[in-house]
């Protein structure tokens, strides 16, 4: 699997405070660096009591900072014209949240935060604490105030009585979003993804080999670009709204409801929506004897979307030598048709053809790369 270099050329200051979740920061550093980032660690005194600065020096390849000295490191990185592109505070305790909200500056982390906010540097913050602390009215108010400062908050996982730090993948996605050109900011993106499952009887289903990987990568890239993303599918994509369905009928109902009640600027039909549904048998079909399964054709969701809502639409066409059919879809109002072949279904990479009125462009690679190419051409 190719790891996209979404943070190549970017310098991220990772500021660590005194939560036990600080032990997760080595993994976070590795994830950021794998995507091309240069990472500089800064620790409060409390954080240094939980994770050794040497561990983060080793992980980042740069000496971790535990104080602001004569080199005025907070200015070198986060001041006007500084080296940093992003200040990422993870984990962030209730104490540090309150200090930043009130402009108090008495640790290396809060000094970096004061400098970054004064410069207008993007700031991403991931809280971590006990749940009772997270629910404290003052902490809630402080978090709301940080939002008014333009700070992007990565919500914690509330479980086992704790507001645990968000998963590394979620934090990295927020960092990527903060450092993107945000070309989809303010736009609503609706994506259908993965396979549908049509019941044959009370036990068996009819489905496809689709894993939803393409839809997932399209959703993640839309999130990075600043969109408000909804995915209708049977799976789970981080950092977006997931509307879970099982059958083609479920998917149709969810999509049409969302379009009617909320609207969407862009609709991407990346799902392998069932073309047929079996005539369902009650109970379980007995095993060991031949059985005929009757299939009834299902209406095309894409046609209904184009007829009623008319968002900017991207469709997928599966098969061989389908460019002519793809071009006929453009005449019906589709903005782009992505043509691929059956072997690509369920694979991590493949060959695609992006068909628009401007022409056809072949794209070969990992599905994350293909998703980036689709969004680039669409925008």
Image (cartoon, rainbow, N blue to C red):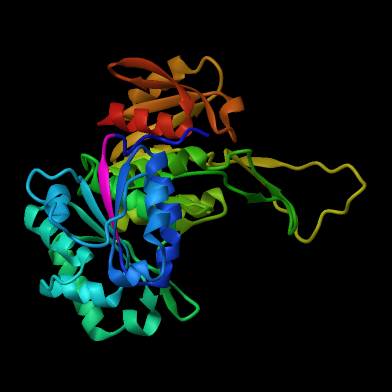
Q: Which residues are magenta?
A: 9-15
Asked whether residue 299 appears in the rendered view, the answer is no
Q: Position of residue 298 (x, y in %)?
A: 55, 42
- How many badges with numbers are in the image? 0
Viewer-nearest residue: 226 or 31: 31
- Say which residue appears at 35% left-offset and 37% top-offset: 36
Left/right placement of residue 253 relative to residue 174 reads: right
Q: Position of residue 267 (x, y in %)?
A: 34, 41
Q: Is 284 positioned to the left or the right of 160 in the image?
A: right
Is the magenta region chiefly helix, strand or loop? strand
358 w.r.t. 379: above or below: above
Tell me where residue 361 appears, x and y as whole percent. 37, 17
Q: Residue furthest right?
A: 288
Q: Position of residue 95 (x, y in %)?
A: 25, 77
Please check the rendered image and state whether residue 144 is part of the magenta-colored stretch, yes or no. Answer: no
11 part of magenta stretch: yes
């Amino acid at each position: 699997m190719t790891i996209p270099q979404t943070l190549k050329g970017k310098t991220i200051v990772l500021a660590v405070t005194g939560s036990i979740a600080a032990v997760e920061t080595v993994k976070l550093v590795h994830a950021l660096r794998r995507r091309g980032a240069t990472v500089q660690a800064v620790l409060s005194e409390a954080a240094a009591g939980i994770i050794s600065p040497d561990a983060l020096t080793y992980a980042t390849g740069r000496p971790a900072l535990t104080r602001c000295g004569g080199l005025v490191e907070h200015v070198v990185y986060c001041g006007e014209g500084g080296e940093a592109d992003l200040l990422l505070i993870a984990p962030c305790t209730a104490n540090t949240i309150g200090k930043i909200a009130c402009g108090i500056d008495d640790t290396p982390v809060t000094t970096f935060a004061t400098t970054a906010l004064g410069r207008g540097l993007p700031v991403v913050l991931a809280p971590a604490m006990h749940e009772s602390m997270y629910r404290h009215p003052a902490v809630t108010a402080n978090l709301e105030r940080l939002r008014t400062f333009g700070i992007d908050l990565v919500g914690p996982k509330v479980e086992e009585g704790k507001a645990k730090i968000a998963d590394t993948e979620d934090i990295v996605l927020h960092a990527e979003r903060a450092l993107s050109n945000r070309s989809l900011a303010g736009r609503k993106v609706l994506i259908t993804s993965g396979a549908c499952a049509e019941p044959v009887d009370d036990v068996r289903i009819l489905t496809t080999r689709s894993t939803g990987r393409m839809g997932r990568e399209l959703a993640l890239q839309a999130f990075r670009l600043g969109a408000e993303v909804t995915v209708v599918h049977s799976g789970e994509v981080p950092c977006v709204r997931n509307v879970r369905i099982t059958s083609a009928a479920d998917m149709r109902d969810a999509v049409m409801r969302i379009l009617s009640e909320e609207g969407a600027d862009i609709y991407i039909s990346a799902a392998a929506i069932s073309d047929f549904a079996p005539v369902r048998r009650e109970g379980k079909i007995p095993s060991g004897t031949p059985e005929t399964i009757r299939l009834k054709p299902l209406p095309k969701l894409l046609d209904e979307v184009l007829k009623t809502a008319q968002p900017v639409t991207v469709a997928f066409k599966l098969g061989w030598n389908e460019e002519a059919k793809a071009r006929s879809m453009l005449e019906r109002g589709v903005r782009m048709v992505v043509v691929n072949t059956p072997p690509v279904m369920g694979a991590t990479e493949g060959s695609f053809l992006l068909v628009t009125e401007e022409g056809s462009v072949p794209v070969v690679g990992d599905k994350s790369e293909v998703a980036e190419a689709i969004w680039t051409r669409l925008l």
